[in-house]
Amino acid sequence: MASRKESGVSSSNTLDSPVKQIQIEGLVVLKIIKHYQEEGQGSEVVQGVLLGLVVEDRLEITNCFPFPQHTEEDADFDEVQYQMEMMRSLRHVNIDHLHVGWYQSTFYGSFVSRALLDSQFSYQHAIEESVVLIYDPIKTAQGSLSLKAYRLTPKLMEICKEKDFSAEGLKKAAVGYENMFEEVPIVIKNSHLISVLLWELEEKSTVPSKHELLSLSSSSHLEKSLQMLMDRVDDMSQDIVKFNTFSRNTSKQQQQKHQYIQRRQQENTQRQSRGEPPLPEEDISKMFKPPQPPPRMDTLLIAGQINTYCQTVKEFTSQNLGKLFMAEALQGHNS
Amino acid sequence: ENYLYCIYSSKHPYNMNLVTIHFNNLIKKMVFCISIYDVKGVDILRRDFLWKNMAVYGPVVKIHPVVLASIADSYERRNEGATRVIGTILGTIDKHSVEITNCFSVPHNESEDEVAVDMEFAKNMYELHKKVSPSEAIVGWYATGFDITEHSVLIHEYYSREAQNPIHLTLDTTLQNGKMNVRAYVSAQMGVPGKTVGVMFTPLTVKHIYYDTERIGIDLLHTTCASPSRTNGLTSDLAQVGTSAARVQDMLTTVLAYIEDVLSGKVIADNSVGRCLMDLLNKVPFIPAEDFESMLNSNINDLLMVTYLTNLAQAQISLNEKLVVL
């Protein structure tokens, strides 16, 4: 089962999407890290815009700038204006001013939400190749940079375009939670000058390189992730209950309609036998209002979120198993 | 231009500083720019020693790597014909130190006679940046290149209006002497009182500081230096543990080689290193075998259970998916 899920994510990369690989400059990575570190401690999410260009089937991201937080005080803050001004200024200093996507930080991996979907859809609609970069600061602090790039699959794009989120619409497009987002592989590339700079820093740095990755004490992180997973599963089960009641209601209604029609026919035949005019056919659909089908999109999003949680937890456990075996080897050597 | 060379003697043991004073006729401003030049032929080690021993009468400058990367990037994107780029640096000021956390480049034109800086642009950008991080203030300006030129003095004057005691940062992108040096200066007045006053740039100590996450990011970026195409993909979970383990293994091999050398007498034993090694060995905790076994097993069991549960959850949602679509 697990391997099928993995292959599901990777096979969607072979869909004919315009972007097969993402190339990021080191500068962008540093800027994203710094932005979260300085401004993101309190609230959950920091966002920003990615700039770059498209080369063949690669998307090169060469710079980025952060978005200010939404606060209550500046209600008249014009986001669009900020963006336009920033891009105009950057153009003066020869920085690529092509919008190619946006980035967002996430809290323990919970980023599959309606807001993200809407934003990414509007981006991808305007610019074919845009991506959303998800940066996980907590996972990064544990030892390895966690940066993932996602795009909406073409199927999901179609659905969003038509705004048809009902069950039939989703069935028609055959979109499952696996096919919502496709992950694009990332490659980091640095210019020669930056490489020289990195070597210099390496020589001069007084802070030793971090070995957080090999630390064994990470159970709190696991607890938190599982907590979020459980919350989502609860949401999911509520949704399922709603759906079940809905389907039960529809079937009950169908039955009622049937009975009503039968009774009508019986009465009509009776009246005919008595020679009276038949009762007018009433509009059945007005009498029995069909129950509202529950929105399917939310369920889909929740399923997608659960999926991402499961993936991250599994990655985490596999890492920890490796580390435990290493510790065992070390101990065995000792005794 | 007239150059006046004079030998400036100080109490330093290395009395080999040469101080050059530029006297700029064209601008007709009695501004003296003094920069401390190294004697040609002084070897690099002595220069570094001089640098470290020079006046540190000023705040310590702490730089984040993102600032340096930004400067290098804007140097690469400079306009044709420009030999250097300048820009503003933002940060926070402490009692004894200045922490530089951000920067942006400012378009400017420089020629023999004059220098023009787009100040409107600088103001605008600062306003925009303030919207994102209100705590960052202008602490100075940067320039790429090796020297401090006369134009730098003028630009420095402009920046003294924006910030108190601005810091001038230089990043040597021309790679003189094969190194990319980062230097920071603060301006000080000098000269005979009553007569024309000059400006001197005194060097400050520069420290590189990192947030934890920045450190991890830099480590990852550093791996791109090794590959020929200067690229590196982001590896996943177990592979990362593998690379980390390989690194530790390398370090252990070096340590072992050193120990072998000492034992065979090739290298003189150093007591402090020996003490460090002792600490290292003591760090592996001595736990009786059964206790460790039970700890290990319980941890492994926890992880396996979690894996099982997540697989179950994934199976559940895919099943739900299929049922709903029926």
Image (tube, coloured by chain):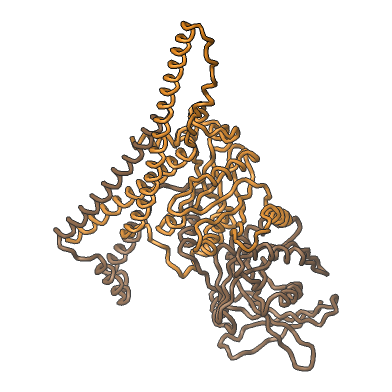
Q: Is residue B228 above or below residue B162?
A: above
Quadrant position of the N terminus of chain A in the picture = top left
Residue ID at (76%, 79%): B22
Query: Residue B47, can we see it?
Result: no
Give percent across and percent down for residue A328: 23, 55
Occupied quadrant, residue B40? bottom right
A156 up-or-down from A194: above or below:
above
Q: In the rendering, at what x and y percent does residue B24 appear? A: 81, 78
Quick one: quadrant of the C terminus of chain A?
bottom left
- Colour assignment, chain A: orange
Residue B100 location, x and y as percent?
58, 70
Q: Quadrant of residue B93?
A: bottom right
Camera-side residue of A6 and B199: A6
Q: State how many labels appear.
A: 0
Q: Residue at x 53, y 73 (%)?
A: B207
Q: Nearer the viewer, residue B68 or A277?
A: A277
Image position of A116 (left or right of B40): left
In the drawing, does residue A54 fall left or right of residue A257?
right
**Residue A75, quarter of the rendered image:** bottom right
Q: In this rendering, does residue A84 appear at all?
A: yes
Which is more toward the observer, A282 or A331?
A282
Task: Provide the letter of the chain coloured brown.
Answer: B
| Residue A173 position in % (x across, y down) | 51, 28
The foreground one among B138 and A110 is A110
Residue at the image position 51 percent from the left and 49 percent from the top: A134
Is B202 situated above or below A61?
below
